[in-house]
């Protein structure tokens, strides 16, 4: 009886949400778990499993027009953004979105979009699912939810009971307005845990930094075909290029996802390319994730989602490479 009552509560929440927001959620399409626009509760995959696609295109579109040419000047444009609820985001992907919030904290285009987006996290069989992340801790609110950005989090606990959390004022208001009375509020304490930056992350940072010029990169460079699929699939890759276009006499400025595996990524005036070998490109990618991001933000530039390994056509496995780097003297 409890289970049915709880499912009905979640169904009603999604139904009410759909009246004010475009809903984007995990769905199964032709047997593949992906992310797409949905109309109702029944279309959503509630397994809590990570979808193959990441959520980043919904907060940082692959292509975005950011300025127009008018009156002899390039003028910023702020596109109209529809109110959107990203619903059913696994904690791993919430960590990636939290990194974007840090990196783009002063970016007006990102911030405008972000204000229109409601982030709704979800954990199935919570907290058992996350015991593997923190094997000796059951205090998942403090250890996990306090350190990721979200507006609402829905935890499906044992017996199919759904527990609601708010993680922001916006989340509190939405839950109250949609008739959810029993929820706990989790105050965001920043992405870094109380005990300080993750020790393994700091050690890996040192290992990757010291691996410059080592054989591992030459070997990976021989294998990698520079297709860039890993970077497209990665929920934390946030580099972008700016391009001024002058098509049809209507000049505009666009920004596009950048990709350090593509040939023009490091090209500068005069044609020089810093990343002129595949080995250098792959090293640069690892340095960005495991050295520059932790150095700048004290969080990892990789959330261990495994998507880069899944999409790599030549079987380059990030977990194996990290294990090799960690063993290096
Ligand atoms: S596992 Fe790969 S795809 Fe996932 S966050 Fe890390 S680098 Fe990106
Ligand atoms: S997906 Fe694999 S082959 Fe393609 S760029 Fe990434 S590491 Fe190289």
Image (tube, rainbow, N blue to C red):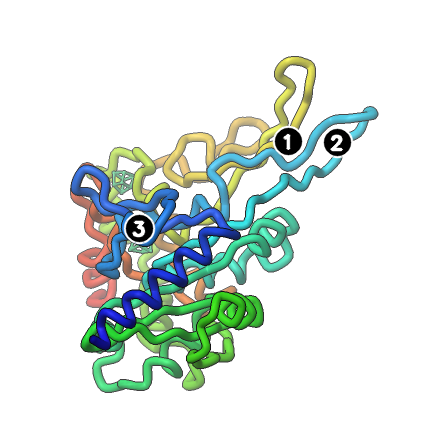
Pointer 2 residue: 74
Image location of residue 276, percent across then percent down? 40, 35
First-in-chain label (3 vs 2)? 3
* Mark 3 or 1: the one toward you: 3
Pointer 1 residue: 253
User: Under tag 3, what secondary structure?
Assistant: strand
Identify the residue at the far right of this view. 71
Q: Is residue 302 above or below residue 228?
A: below
Tell me what residue is drawn at x 20 percent, y 43 percent.
32
User: Under tag 2, what secondary structure?
Assistant: strand
Image location of residue 148, percent across then percent down? 44, 70
Tell me what residue is drawn at x 38 percent, y 81 percent.
141
**Looking at the figure, which quarter contains the N terminus?**
bottom left
**Looking at the figure, which quarter contains the C terminus?**
bottom left
Q: Which mark is residue 37?
A: none
First-in-chain label (2 vs 1)? 2
- Is there CB contact under 8 Å for labels 3 and 1? no
* Mark 3 or 2: the one toward you: 3
- Does residue 329 appear in the picture of this structure? no
First-in-chain label (3 vs 1)? 3
* Ligand 2 neighbours mark 2 (CB distance < 8 Å): no
Tell me what residue is drawn at x 51 percent, y 31 percent.
272
Left of 181 or right of it: where is 32? left
**35 or 2, nearer to the observer:** 2
- Does residue 272 appear in the picture of this structure? yes
Q: Which mark is residue 26?
A: 3
Quarter of the view holding residue 201: bottom left
Image location of residue 186, percent across then percent down? 47, 79
**Real-space Cα distance between discs 3 and 2?**
38 Å
Q: Is residue 76 above or below residue 161?
A: above
Dot 3 crowding, Cα within 10 Å, few <14, some 14–19, many 20+: many
Left of 145 or right of it: where is 117? right
């Amino acid at each position: 009886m409890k289970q049915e009552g709880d499912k009905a509560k979640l169904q009603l929440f999604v139904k009410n949400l759909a009246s004010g927001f475009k809903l984007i959620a995990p769905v199964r399409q032709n047997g593949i778990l992906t992310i797409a626009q949905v109309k109702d509760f029944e279309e959503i995959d509630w397994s809590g499993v990570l979808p193959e696609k990441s959520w980043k295109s919904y907060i940082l579109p692959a292509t975005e027009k950011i300025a127009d040419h008018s009156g002899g000047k390039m003028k910023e444009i702020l596109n109209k953004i529809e109110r959107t609820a990203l619903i059913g985001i696994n904690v791993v992907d919430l960590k990636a979105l939290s990194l974007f919030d840090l990196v783009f904290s002063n970016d007006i285009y990102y911030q405008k979009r972000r204000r229109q987006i409601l982030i709704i996290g979800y954990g199935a069989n919570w907290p058992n699912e996350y015991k593997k992340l923190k094997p000796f801790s059951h205090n998942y609110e403090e250890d996990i939810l306090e350190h990721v950005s979200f507006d609402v989090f829905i935890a499906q606990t044992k017996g199919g009971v759904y527990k609601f959390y708010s993680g922001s004022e916006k989340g509190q208001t939405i839950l109250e307005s949609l008739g959810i009375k029993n929820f706990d509020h989790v105050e965001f304490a920043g992405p870094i845990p109380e005990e300080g930056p993750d020790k393994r992350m700091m050690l890996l940072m040192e290992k990757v930094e010291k691996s410059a010029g080592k054989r591992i990169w030459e070997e990976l460079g021989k294998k990698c075909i520079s297709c860039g699929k890993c970077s497209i699939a990665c929920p934390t890759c946030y580099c972008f290029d700016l391009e001024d276009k002058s098509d049809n006499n209507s000049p505009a400025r666009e920004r596009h996802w950048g990709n350090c595996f593509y040939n023009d990524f490091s090209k500068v005036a005069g044609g020089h390319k810093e990343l002129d070998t595949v080995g250098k490109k792959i090293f640069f990618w690892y340095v960005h994730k495991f050295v520059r991001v932790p150095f700048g933000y004290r969080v990892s530039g990789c959330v261990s989602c495994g998507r880069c390994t899944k999409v790599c056509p030549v079987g380059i496995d990030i977990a194996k490479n990290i294990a090799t780097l960690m063993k290096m003297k």
